[in-house]
């Protein structure tokens, strides 16, 4: 019996692979390596290079590896990119997910965990944001993920399988043991960009908008350590295998930090000042979004270990330094 991790060579997926291996699971990764890296899982799990919408390939993998559960990360993840390329996002995140779900149903895979996003909420009026808040995505990215959530809900009602949808808030940090981390080239996520600037890979960075209706005028987000996030997936897998049924849960800590607070944390932890330029608002950005995080703790008995901004930043910086050393060698 094994777990199929789509997008397992990517940032979050590769942390998931290590989490599963640490718990003694058999893991097979399906990744087309468009943004992921084979070295992220090399020697640890079986890697199949291919597309999640190649049903012949996917179904062969499921049968050959006796896959009982799929954890689905593969997809496109950049909010502003989705605004300029909505069709690309609906293809990668919605249409291809439909194909993967169909393969899962056909092959009798019983458990499906889906990597969703807080972007399905848009800019909610009340904080923190609970799972029953109305879904009003403001970007094609959020809409593309919401559509897959709805497909899973309807398929679980019609066919013999359970699903868990985990709605991620802002995932950041890296494996404390530095086995993997965020290695994406041209990454756009705030903590990654700030760490690249602190380690000299970028001459300066930008703050996208300082005129929002927040205490310091910059957007507020709930940053969650990637290792805590993948642990929630492992607990969700155990929960479904124990017959507890489907679940939709937020993955965040319930703490909000502004863009400026994050940048200052990076400067503090790195003990380095760097140039920060103020520029205009970025398309598709929600003003503020912070999780109501109780359901994950209660339903999964989730006990986060890294709920601290400086720890997240420290692990992200350690990984950035490791990447810099690797590039020099
Ligand atoms: N930001 C900057 N400068 C940068 C990068 C980001 O000011 O160089 C700002 C953004 O404008 C935004 C905040 O930092 O206000 C966070 O931006 P990220 O790109 O790090 O993350 P997003 O909030 O856009 O999106 C992420 C995930 C989504 C998820 C969302 C939920 O990519 O999947 O968090 O809050 F839905």
Image: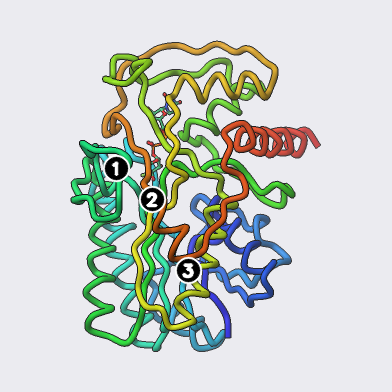
In the image, 66: left or right of 80? Answer: right
Which residue position is annotated with label 3?
236
Q: CA distance from mark 3 to mark 1?
A: 28 Å
Circle 1 — which element?
helix
Q: Nearer the viewer, mark 3 or mark 1?
A: 3
Q: Is residue 97 above or below residue 181?
A: below
Q: Is residue 69 above or below residue 255?
A: below
Q: Position of residue 197 (x, y in %)?
A: 59, 22
Circle 3 — which element?
helix
Crowding at mark 1 (Cα within 10 Å: few <14, some 14-19, many 20+): many
In the image, 135: left or right of 305? Answer: left
Circle 2 — which element?
loop
| Residue 283, quarter of the rendered image | top left
Q: Quadrant of ligand 1?
A: top left
- The numbered disc on residue 82 is 1
Name the N-terminal-most of marks 1 and 2. 2
Tell me whether the residue at label 1 lies in contact with that at label 2, contact meaning CB atoms closer than 8 angstroms.
yes
Q: CA distance from mark 1 to mark 2?
A: 8 Å
Which residue position is annotated with label 2?
76
| Viewer-nearest residue: 166 or 56 | 166
Crowding at mark 2 (Cα within 10 Å: few <14, some 14-19, many 20+): some
Instruction: Name the residue: 72% across, 33% down.
Output: 321
Quarter of the C terminus within the rendering: top right
């Amino acid at each position: 019996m094994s777990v199929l991790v789509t997008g397992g060579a990517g940032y979050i997926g590769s942390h998931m692979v290590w989490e599963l291996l640490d718990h003694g699971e058999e893991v097979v990764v399906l990744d087309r390596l468009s943004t992921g890296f084979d070295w992220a899982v090399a020697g640890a799990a079986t890697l199949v290079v291919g597309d999640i919408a190649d049903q012949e390939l996917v179904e062969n993998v499921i049968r050959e590896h006796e896959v009982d559960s799929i954890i689905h990360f593969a997809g496109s993840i950049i909010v502003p990119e989705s605004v300029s390329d909505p069709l690309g996002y609906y293809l990668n995140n919605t249409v291809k997910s439909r194909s993967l779900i169909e393969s899962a149903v056909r092959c009798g895979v019983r458990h499906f965990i889906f990597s969703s996003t807080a972007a399905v909420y848009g800019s909610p009026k009340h904080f923190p944001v609970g799972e029953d808040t109305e879904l009003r995505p403001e970007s094609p990215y959020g809409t593309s993920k919401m559509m897959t959530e709805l497909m899973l809900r309807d398929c679980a009602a019609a066919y013999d399988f359970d699903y868990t949808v985990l709605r991620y808030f802002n995932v950041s940090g890296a494996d404390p043991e530095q086995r993997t981390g965020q290695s994406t080239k041209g990454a756009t996520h705030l903590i990654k960009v700030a760490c690249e600037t602190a380690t000299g890979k970028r001459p300066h960075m930008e703050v996208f908008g300082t005129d929002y209706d927040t205490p310091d005028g910059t957007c507020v987000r709930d940053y969650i350590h990637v290792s805590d996030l993948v642990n929630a997936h492992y607990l969700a897998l155990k929960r479904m295998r124990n017959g507890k049924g489907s679940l939709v849960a937020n993955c965040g800590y319930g703490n909000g930090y502004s863009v400026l607070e994050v940048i200052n944390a990076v400067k503090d932890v790195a003990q380095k000042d760097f140039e920060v330029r103020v520029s205009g608002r970025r398309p598709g950005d929600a003003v503020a979004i912070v999780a109501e995080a109780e359901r994950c703790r209660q339903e999964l008995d989730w006990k986060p270990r890294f709920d601290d901004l400086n720890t997240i930043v420290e692990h992200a910086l350690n990984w950035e330094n490791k990447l810099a050393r690797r590039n020099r060698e």
